[in-house]
Image: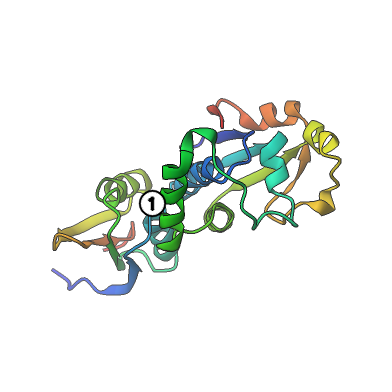
Amino acid sequence: MPVLEISQTIDARGLSCPMPIVKTAQAVRTIPSGAAIELLATDVGSIKDVAAWCKATGNELIEQTSDGAVYRFVIRRKGGL
Amino acid sequence: MDEPLNLVLFSGTDDKLQAAAVLTAGAAALGKPVNIFLQYWALDAFRSARIGQDHGLAPEAGPAGRAAVDALARAGQASWAETLRQAKDLGSVDIQACSLSMDLLNLESTDLDSLVDGVEGVTAFYLNAGAGQVVFI
Protein backbone atom coordinates (compact mmCIF):
# COMPACT_ATOMS: atom_id res chain seq x y z
CA MET A 1 0.00 0.00 0.00
CA PRO A 2 1.51 3.34 -1.02
CA VAL A 3 2.28 5.83 1.69
CA LEU A 4 -0.23 8.65 1.67
CA GLU A 5 1.41 12.02 1.38
CA ILE A 6 -0.29 14.99 2.98
CA SER A 7 0.16 17.93 0.61
CA GLN A 8 -0.87 20.65 3.03
CA THR A 9 -2.40 21.35 6.40
CA ILE A 10 -5.41 23.61 6.71
CA ASP A 11 -5.44 25.22 10.12
CA ALA A 12 -9.07 26.16 10.71
CA ARG A 13 -8.79 26.13 14.49
CA GLY A 14 -10.86 28.91 16.00
CA LEU A 15 -12.84 29.45 12.79
CA SER A 16 -16.60 29.10 12.93
CA CYS A 17 -18.89 27.35 10.46
CA PRO A 18 -18.69 27.31 7.44
CA MET A 19 -15.06 28.42 7.19
CA PRO A 20 -13.48 24.98 7.88
CA ILE A 21 -15.40 23.60 4.88
CA VAL A 22 -14.78 26.68 2.74
CA LYS A 23 -11.04 26.42 3.34
CA THR A 24 -11.11 22.67 2.76
CA ALA A 25 -12.91 23.08 -0.56
CA GLN A 26 -10.47 25.80 -1.60
CA ALA A 27 -7.46 23.66 -0.70
CA VAL A 28 -8.64 20.38 -2.21
CA ARG A 29 -9.02 21.89 -5.66
CA THR A 30 -5.36 22.96 -5.61
CA ILE A 31 -3.99 19.44 -5.09
CA PRO A 32 -3.77 16.61 -7.63
CA SER A 33 -6.14 13.64 -7.60
CA GLY A 34 -5.07 11.08 -5.04
CA ALA A 35 -3.22 13.64 -2.92
CA ALA A 36 -4.47 14.50 0.55
CA ILE A 37 -4.86 17.42 2.90
CA GLU A 38 -5.00 17.56 6.66
CA LEU A 39 -7.65 19.76 8.29
CA LEU A 40 -7.50 20.96 11.88
CA ALA A 41 -10.71 22.45 13.26
CA THR A 42 -12.38 23.30 16.54
CA ASP A 43 -15.88 23.91 15.19
CA VAL A 44 -17.97 21.03 16.52
CA GLY A 45 -20.12 21.17 13.37
CA SER A 46 -17.11 20.14 11.31
CA ILE A 47 -17.48 16.51 12.48
CA LYS A 48 -20.66 16.04 10.48
CA ASP A 49 -19.90 18.73 7.90
CA VAL A 50 -16.61 17.25 6.70
CA ALA A 51 -18.18 13.82 6.31
CA ALA A 52 -21.17 15.30 4.47
CA TRP A 53 -18.96 17.40 2.21
CA CYS A 54 -16.80 14.41 1.31
CA LYS A 55 -19.88 12.30 0.57
CA ALA A 56 -21.42 15.01 -1.63
CA THR A 57 -18.26 15.86 -3.54
CA GLY A 58 -16.85 12.34 -3.91
CA ASN A 59 -13.66 13.10 -2.01
CA GLU A 60 -12.58 10.58 0.58
CA LEU A 61 -12.40 11.10 4.32
CA ILE A 62 -9.67 8.66 5.23
CA GLU A 63 -8.90 9.66 8.77
CA GLN A 64 -10.77 11.40 11.56
CA THR A 65 -9.37 11.82 15.04
CA SER A 66 -9.78 14.17 17.96
CA ASP A 67 -7.77 15.06 21.02
CA GLY A 68 -10.89 16.43 22.66
CA ALA A 69 -10.50 20.07 21.68
CA VAL A 70 -9.20 19.82 18.12
CA TYR A 71 -10.64 17.66 15.36
CA ARG A 72 -8.25 16.35 12.74
CA PHE A 73 -9.33 15.10 9.34
CA VAL A 74 -7.37 13.70 6.42
CA ILE A 75 -9.13 14.04 3.08
CA ARG A 76 -7.98 12.55 -0.19
CA ARG A 77 -8.98 14.18 -3.44
CA LYS A 78 -11.11 11.95 -5.61
CA GLY A 79 -9.63 10.05 -8.51
CA GLY A 80 -6.19 8.47 -8.74
CA LEU A 81 -4.64 5.96 -6.36
CA MET B 1 -26.79 19.17 -6.39
CA ASP B 2 -27.40 20.79 -9.78
CA GLU B 3 -30.52 22.80 -8.90
CA PRO B 4 -29.52 26.18 -7.50
CA LEU B 5 -30.23 27.48 -4.03
CA ASN B 6 -32.12 30.76 -4.37
CA LEU B 7 -31.96 33.25 -1.54
CA VAL B 8 -34.13 36.33 -1.40
CA LEU B 9 -32.51 38.68 1.10
CA PHE B 10 -34.89 41.28 2.49
CA SER B 11 -33.56 42.05 5.97
CA GLY B 12 -30.50 44.24 6.27
CA THR B 13 -29.33 43.40 9.78
CA ASP B 14 -25.92 41.84 10.25
CA ASP B 15 -27.22 38.66 11.90
CA LYS B 16 -29.59 37.76 9.06
CA LEU B 17 -27.00 38.65 6.44
CA GLN B 18 -24.46 36.49 8.30
CA ALA B 19 -26.88 33.56 8.32
CA ALA B 20 -27.45 34.02 4.59
CA ALA B 21 -23.71 34.20 3.93
CA VAL B 22 -23.15 30.94 5.83
CA LEU B 23 -25.86 29.20 3.79
CA THR B 24 -24.29 30.55 0.63
CA ALA B 25 -20.74 29.48 1.48
CA GLY B 26 -21.90 26.00 2.48
CA ALA B 27 -23.73 25.55 -0.81
CA ALA B 28 -20.75 26.89 -2.78
CA ALA B 29 -18.45 24.41 -1.04
CA LEU B 30 -20.74 21.60 -2.19
CA GLY B 31 -20.70 22.84 -5.77
CA LYS B 32 -24.31 23.97 -5.60
CA PRO B 33 -24.99 27.21 -7.52
CA VAL B 34 -26.49 30.04 -5.49
CA ASN B 35 -28.60 32.93 -6.76
CA ILE B 36 -29.07 35.84 -4.37
CA PHE B 37 -31.73 38.49 -4.94
CA LEU B 38 -31.31 41.64 -2.84
CA GLN B 39 -34.43 43.52 -1.84
CA TYR B 40 -35.20 46.47 0.42
CA TRP B 41 -32.96 46.74 3.49
CA ALA B 42 -30.65 43.92 2.46
CA LEU B 43 -29.87 45.85 -0.71
CA ASP B 44 -29.25 48.98 1.36
CA ALA B 45 -26.60 47.07 3.35
CA PHE B 46 -24.71 46.35 0.08
CA ARG B 47 -24.03 50.04 -0.63
CA SER B 48 -20.29 50.30 -1.09
CA ALA B 49 -20.20 53.24 1.31
CA ARG B 50 -21.95 51.29 4.06
CA ILE B 51 -21.15 47.61 3.63
CA GLY B 52 -18.49 47.60 6.35
CA GLN B 53 -20.61 49.47 8.86
CA ASP B 54 -22.67 48.14 11.75
CA HIS B 55 -26.11 47.24 10.37
CA GLY B 56 -27.63 46.27 13.70
CA LEU B 57 -29.33 43.02 14.64
CA ALA B 58 -32.85 41.65 14.36
CA PRO B 59 -35.14 42.86 17.18
CA GLU B 60 -35.21 39.45 18.86
CA ALA B 61 -31.45 39.58 19.47
CA GLY B 62 -31.73 41.94 22.45
CA PRO B 63 -28.71 42.99 24.53
CA ALA B 64 -27.63 39.39 25.22
CA GLY B 65 -27.74 38.62 21.50
CA ARG B 66 -25.71 41.73 20.76
CA ALA B 67 -23.06 40.61 23.24
CA ALA B 68 -22.96 37.09 21.77
CA VAL B 69 -22.58 38.38 18.21
CA ASP B 70 -19.84 40.79 19.29
CA ALA B 71 -17.99 37.98 21.09
CA LEU B 72 -18.02 35.82 17.96
CA ALA B 73 -16.71 38.72 15.88
CA ARG B 74 -13.91 39.36 18.39
CA ALA B 75 -13.03 35.66 18.22
CA GLY B 76 -12.31 36.18 14.53
CA GLN B 77 -15.55 35.25 12.76
CA ALA B 78 -15.43 36.55 9.19
CA SER B 79 -17.96 39.28 8.39
CA TRP B 80 -20.89 38.39 6.15
CA ALA B 81 -19.34 40.38 3.33
CA GLU B 82 -16.04 38.50 3.64
CA THR B 83 -17.90 35.16 3.84
CA LEU B 84 -19.75 36.03 0.63
CA ARG B 85 -16.47 36.98 -1.07
CA GLN B 86 -15.03 33.58 -0.16
CA ALA B 87 -18.18 31.86 -1.37
CA LYS B 88 -17.95 33.67 -4.72
CA ASP B 89 -14.32 32.63 -5.01
CA LEU B 90 -15.25 29.02 -4.32
CA GLY B 91 -18.28 28.44 -6.48
CA SER B 92 -21.04 29.81 -8.65
CA VAL B 93 -22.64 32.60 -6.61
CA ASP B 94 -24.59 35.27 -8.46
CA ILE B 95 -25.79 38.32 -6.52
CA GLN B 96 -28.41 40.52 -8.16
CA ALA B 97 -30.08 43.69 -6.94
CA CYS B 98 -33.86 43.92 -7.26
CA SER B 99 -34.64 46.72 -9.70
CA LEU B 100 -37.70 47.85 -7.72
CA SER B 101 -35.57 48.19 -4.59
CA MET B 102 -32.97 50.12 -6.57
CA ASP B 103 -35.72 52.65 -7.40
CA LEU B 104 -37.05 52.65 -3.86
CA LEU B 105 -33.64 53.47 -2.41
CA ASN B 106 -32.73 55.77 -5.29
CA LEU B 107 -29.60 53.74 -6.06
CA GLU B 108 -27.40 53.46 -9.13
CA SER B 109 -25.29 50.35 -9.89
CA THR B 110 -22.20 52.40 -9.07
CA ASP B 111 -23.46 52.86 -5.50
CA LEU B 112 -23.20 49.11 -4.84
CA ASP B 113 -20.31 47.01 -3.58
CA SER B 114 -18.51 44.86 -6.14
CA LEU B 115 -20.07 41.75 -4.56
CA VAL B 116 -23.23 42.65 -6.50
CA ASP B 117 -23.09 41.29 -10.05
CA GLY B 118 -25.98 43.22 -11.54
CA VAL B 119 -29.57 44.42 -11.38
CA GLU B 120 -32.58 42.37 -12.43
CA GLY B 121 -36.32 42.09 -12.00
CA VAL B 122 -38.23 39.36 -10.24
CA THR B 123 -39.00 37.52 -13.47
CA ALA B 124 -35.33 37.05 -14.28
CA PHE B 125 -34.79 35.87 -10.71
CA TYR B 126 -37.49 33.20 -11.04
CA LEU B 127 -36.17 32.12 -14.41
CA ASN B 128 -32.68 31.60 -12.99
CA ALA B 129 -34.12 29.91 -9.89
CA GLY B 130 -35.29 27.00 -12.04
CA ALA B 131 -36.59 24.15 -9.90
CA GLY B 132 -34.40 25.07 -6.94
CA GLN B 133 -35.75 26.11 -3.57
CA VAL B 134 -36.44 29.77 -2.85
CA VAL B 135 -35.57 30.90 0.66
CA PHE B 136 -36.66 34.30 1.99
CA ILE B 137 -34.55 35.87 4.72
- State left or right for residue B55 relative to residue B48: left
Task: Inspect the image, locate mark 1, and give the three-letter code of the amino acid beneath it.
Answer: Cys
Give the number of callouts: 1
Give the residue at x 41% y 56%.
B71
Q: Is residue B115 shown to the viewer in this render?
A: yes
Q: Is residue B74 above or below residue B3?
A: below
Chain letter of disc 1 in the image:
A
Q: Is residue A41 above or below residue B45?
A: below
Check disc 1 and report the residue beneath it.
A17
Give the residue at x 44% y 68%.
A30
Across and down, in percent, residue A76 comes to: 29, 61
Give the residue at x 29% y 48%.
A45
Relative depth, front residue between B40 and B85: B40
- State left or right for residue A40 relative to residue B30: left
Image quarter where the C terminus of chain A lies is: bottom left
Looking at this rendering, what residue extends furthest in the front direction?
Answer: B63
Relative depth, front residue between B82 and B88: B82
Relative depth, front residue between A50 and B12: B12
Indicate the quadrant where residue A23 lies: bottom left
Q: Is residue B4 shown to the viewer in this render?
A: no
Badge 1 marks a residue whose secondary structure is loop
Across and down, in percent, residue A3 comes to: 17, 73
